[in-house]
Amino acid sequence: MVNYLGACLFFSSQAFSRISEEIAKEYFMPTTLSPSHAYLLHAIVLSEGISPSKLASIMCLSPSTVTRLVDKLVYRGLVEREFIGKTSNLKATKSGVELKDIIEQSMQKLNSKFIEIFGEQKIESLNLDFKEFILKLNSKENL
């Protein structure tokens, strides 16, 4: 019997992503947003105006994924697009800004849950490892 868990980074990271997203959905329920939408909105709120391409870079997402996620936030009245010539910026609406504290509470509770499960040192180590992996995999020479 084949066991990919722990033997294949791709398989293990995908399994981790699926399981951690299910946990995150529970903690982000008070925001009425998916974790992905909540993190994106949070970044937009903190930036006080950001281009979609800059947001895609910060969030490690493709521009088309950012467009799809932002479309839903615009539809919900949480974000608006400001056009200056051919350039567009994303800005949180008053309703979007009002969710900032709830989003941050959800982030904190989720992080506390992971610390409870794994311990603070392991979480810090995993975060640094993930950052290193992502930066290396995202570099042009590795694509």
Image (cartoon, rainbow, N blue to C red):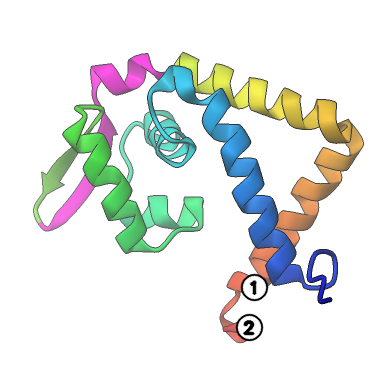
Q: Which residues are magenta?
A: 86-99
Q: Residue furthest left?
A: 85
Observer-nearest residue: 109 or 117?
117
- Rounded to the nearest angstrom, the CA distance separating label 2 from label 1 is 6 Å
Please, what secondary structure does the residue beneath circle 2 have?
helix
Give how far across and how far down residue 104 sits, in percent.
54, 21
Q: Position of residue 19 (x, y in %)?
A: 65, 45
Q: Is residue 51 visible?
A: no
- Residue 22 seen from this side: yes
Question: How many discs appear?
Answer: 2
27 lies left or right of 3 = left
* Residue sitting farthest toward the front: 1
Say left or right for 106 vs 114.
Answer: left
Secondary structure under tag 1 reads helix
Q: Earlier in the sequence, mark 2 or mark 1?
A: 1
Residue type for callout 2: Asn
Quickly name the residue at label 2.
Answer: 142
Residue 87 within the segment the image draws in magenta: yes
Q: Residue at x 88, y 41 (%)?
A: 122
Looking at the rendered structure, the kind of residue marked 1 is: Leu
Residue at 78% across, 71% down: 4
Q: Which residue is located at x 57 percent, y 83 percent?
A: 143
- Residue 20 placement: quadrant: top right
Tag on residue 25?
none
Residue to which mark 1 is pinned: 137
Towards the viewer: 44 or 67: 67
**In front: 4, or 65?**
4
**Placement of 6 over or under 15, stated as above or below:** below
